[in-house]
Every structure is written in structure tokens, then in C-alpha cells.
Amino acid sequence: MKILSKSKKSAHARAAEDQDAKVENIDYKMVTFTLGGKDYGIDIMKVKEIAKFINFTYVPNTPPFVRGVYNLRGEIISIIDLREMFNLPHEDDENLDEENGLILRLESNMIGVVVDKIDKVVGISKETIQPPHPIFGDINIKYISGVVENDGRLYIILDVERILGKPEEEKDKDQQDELQRQVRRQNYSQEQSSESRSTQQSSQKKKGSQQSGETTASSPGKKPVKSEDSESVNKQFIIETLETFEHFFVSDINRDWFEQRFQEWKNERSKDNLQLSNKSDANQFLTGFSSRYTSRLWEKDLFDALYTALPDDVDNQLHIWNPGCGKGYETYSLAVLLKTKYPAARLKIWASDKDLLSVSSAPNMIFDEKAVPDIYREHMVSGPNGLSFNQEIKDAILFEYHDIAHAHAMPPIQLLVARDLLSYLSREDSSRLLNELDERMKAGGIVILGDHERIPSAYPWEEQADKELRFYRKKSS
């Protein structure tokens, strides 16, 4: 009896020791916080720091859960309100000076999130994390990596990569594209090797025949590799690789430039080294495609060329669209040009981009005085850090977040400036945009594309060009 009791006691002791060991085995830490009255956690490895957010910069045309952007010690990051994103209850306090949040470091970017209250760092064993279940939270189960109980509190662990990172379908597509690219590269290499061996054998046979005084003939039933077929394979390989690495789409919009660049590429590289093996090769192939004065204010030659192209008689109210505006260099150049050409007109320029950080910093751009051409100076004011455009120019521009793949709500326009944009849209999106322009543009309206882009002849636009500028005018119906 005593022996049995001792055995039982040992079993209980071992169980207690196992439980203690499980508790002491802390191999997962999470930063915990509250949302809508419930406890949540995020893997501490995804958290860069805990923050108090003050003075967001609002960005127009963004979803309600995008609070704006925030200057984190000189680095601009997007701020997402998780409460708004998941429709969780919370009080809006306009008098609140600062808000609780976390700075997250994801695989593809850094981002800030607003929460109700930061709690503490909790250490647990991964073995205690249970699979997610719909009853555990008000958030879609696909955004929950697990749930865990600690000190009598139930924590819902969020999968921030799935919530805020690159969508899984995009990751899967990237992996599929990479796999297909590797297969194409392997096939390409095999074709090149086969062609090289065939050429070498043919050369050896020819040499042997000449030495023996015999004439040569093609082997019956065997097709020699045609140089035009090989060139077609090379072109298609480059086209597909440009899409993969640079999201650059070869189409009738830029076909002339591509054909010319391909011939240059052949002269720069050896015959067996035409393929684009990586992003660096793709970037090198696109050297020279960007239009003049990309990412800088226009110089006088382009300024004057467009000034001459614009009609003298226009409406008192001018509506202009500048999609893909980036940081705003082109938009400011355009605004000054239009103010110079039409001083009495009321301007409204919709400057949009899907790069939230760039478009949000554009309204507050500061320019180095040495880098500003003289044509802009009368429209600028001096500050402690450099020059900026005056209020009249800024009031004419609306910088906003917008993805060109989606329709944009704006009145009919008289001018569109979208240099180099169409080449970086899928063929379907560029075609849709050109069709949309046909409906949105007023008769006689003007389209300015990139230096190496053209509107295909199937669309109702009249091409006009001189040595400085090519532009398109909408034909009267």
C-alpha cells in the first residue's frame, strides 16, 4: 500500500515537473494589445518598436483604415488603423493628441498600426498555441495564426504578414513566374547549346569537305536552325523576363523602341548571352527608355515644346490628369507651364499614384536652389531648407492615392500627361485606360506620353510631332 502511494506521488510529481518545464520553455514572445475590448498579440519578431503616433499626414482618396503617413525619424511609413480595417468598435476622439501603435517590420515593407492600448510582452511556449477558431474573435479566421491562454487571459495572435504584407496569391504567382522563367531559361540554354553544336558540326563538315574536294549537301530530313527563329526566341524570352523583373510590358505602345533596343542589345552582348538572367540585366536592357527629365523638373526645351503644342484658346476652367505622378516633379513642372500659358484660367490637376509614400510627400517637396531651372523661380518661395512652390501652384494640384487599374471619378479633362506610365501597365490595363480616355477626354484634348511611347493607330487620336515633342490630339467626333 505504501509502495502504491509512493508510486502515485511520483507520477503526480512527474506531471507537475512536466507542466513546469512546459511553462519554463518560453520559445515564443508576443507584444500584446487590445482591440475592441479583446486581447491580441503579434509575434515580437515582427515588431520594430512600440510608438505613440502624433500628427499624421492625411492622403486623399485612400481607404478609411489608412490614417495617412507618418515621419519616423526621417523615414515615411504608412499608418493603418486595425480597428477601422476590421470594423471593430472604438471611440473617435478628435482631441486626442497621440495614439497607441506599433511599428511593424514585414517581409516587403515597414508599416505602422494603430491599436486601442498596448499591454505588455508575453512569453509562452509554442506548444500552448491552439489553432484559430471563428468564435475567438471578430476578425476573419484567415488573419489569425492561433490563440493562446496565459494567466487567465485569452490572446488572439494575428498573422500580420497575411493582413498587411503581400497577398498570398501574389506570392504564389511570383513563385510560379519564377519557376516558369527558370524552365524557359533552361530551354533557352539547351536551344542555344544545340544550335551552337549544330553550327560547329556544320562548320567541321564543310571544312572537311573542302579539304577533300567534295561538295556538301544538307542531310535529308534534318532542318537547319534558322537565324530568324532563334531571334524570335530571344525576343520572346526578353519580353517575358522584362515583365517578371521590371513589370514592363512590350506592346504596340513601345514596340518601336523595343525593336531598336533589341538590336543594340545584340551588339552589346555575345550571341550566347542575350537572355536577361536577373533584375540587374532587365534594368540594364531598359537603359534609355525613361523620358527626358524623369524625377526632376523639366528643363526649358521640353517646357517650351509643350508650351507651343498647347492651344491658345481654352476654357476658363482647365481639368488635367497626371497619373503616375510619383514624387511630383512632373506635376509641378506642368502646373507652372499651365500658369504661364493660361494665367487667367482656373487650374485643377489631379496628380495620382499608387505609391503612397511618394504621393504623400509630394505636397511638401523642398528643392535645392542650385537644381531649380530659372523658369520656375518666380513661382517659388525660399525657406530654411531650400525652395518650395508658392501657394498658388500648390492650390492648383490635388495629390492623391489612386491605382490606375481602377476607374477614377473626375470630370471631363482637356489634358493628360502620363509619361512612361502605359509601358508599366499590363496590356489589358493600358488598353482599358486608352478606352477610358476616349470617353473622358474632351474633343481636341491632348495626351502626352513618354518619349518612346505611341498611341496605337486603332484609337481615335491624331499624332502630332516635331523634333522636340510628340503628342496626341483627340479627333473631333
Image (cartoon, rainbow, N blue to C red):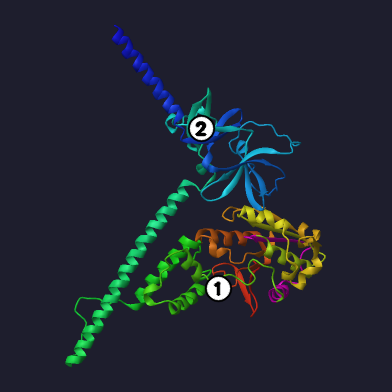
The first of marks 1 and 2 along the sequence is: 2
Q: Does 207 appear above or below 41?
A: below
> What SS does tag 1 mark?
loop
Relative placement, left or right, of 13 versus 91 is: left
Task: Tell me if 155 is positioned left or right of 292 in this view.
Answer: left
Q: Position of residue 47 (x, y in %)?
A: 56, 42
Picture quarter with the C terminus: bottom right
Give the quadrant of residue 416.
bottom right
In the image, farthest residue toward the bottom: 213
Q: Does residue 307 belong to the magenta stretch?
A: yes
Please rate how many residues cluster around mark 1, counting C-alpha atoms within 10 Å: few if below 14, some from 14 to 19, many from 20. few
Q: Is residue 257 above or below residue 247?
A: below
Depth check, mark 1 against mark 2: the one in front is 2
Q: Is residue 204 visible?
A: yes
Amino acid type, label 1: Gly
Which residue bears the numbered disc 2? 123
In this orientation, which residue lies closer to the viewer: 357 or 306? 357
The quadrant in which residue 79 appears is top right
Q: Residues within 10 Å of mark 2 (few under 14, many from 20)?
A: some
Q: Position of residue 131 (x, y in %)?
A: 44, 31
Residue 179 to residue 131: above or below: below
Name the residue located 75 percent from the left edge and 37 percent from the top edge.
Answer: 94
Please report contact status of discs 1 and 2: CB closer than 8 Å, yes or no. Answer: no
Name the residue rendered at 71%, 39% in the picture. Answer: 98
- Name the amino acid type tagged 2: Gly
Residue 330 lies left or right of residue 250; in this view the side is right
Secondary structure of residue under mark 2 = strand
Question: Residue 370 appears in which quarter of the rendering?
Answer: bottom right
Q: Which portion, as a residue range, is magenta?
A: 301-326
Give the x, y percent position of residue 40.
55, 32
Indicate which disc residue 288 carries: 1
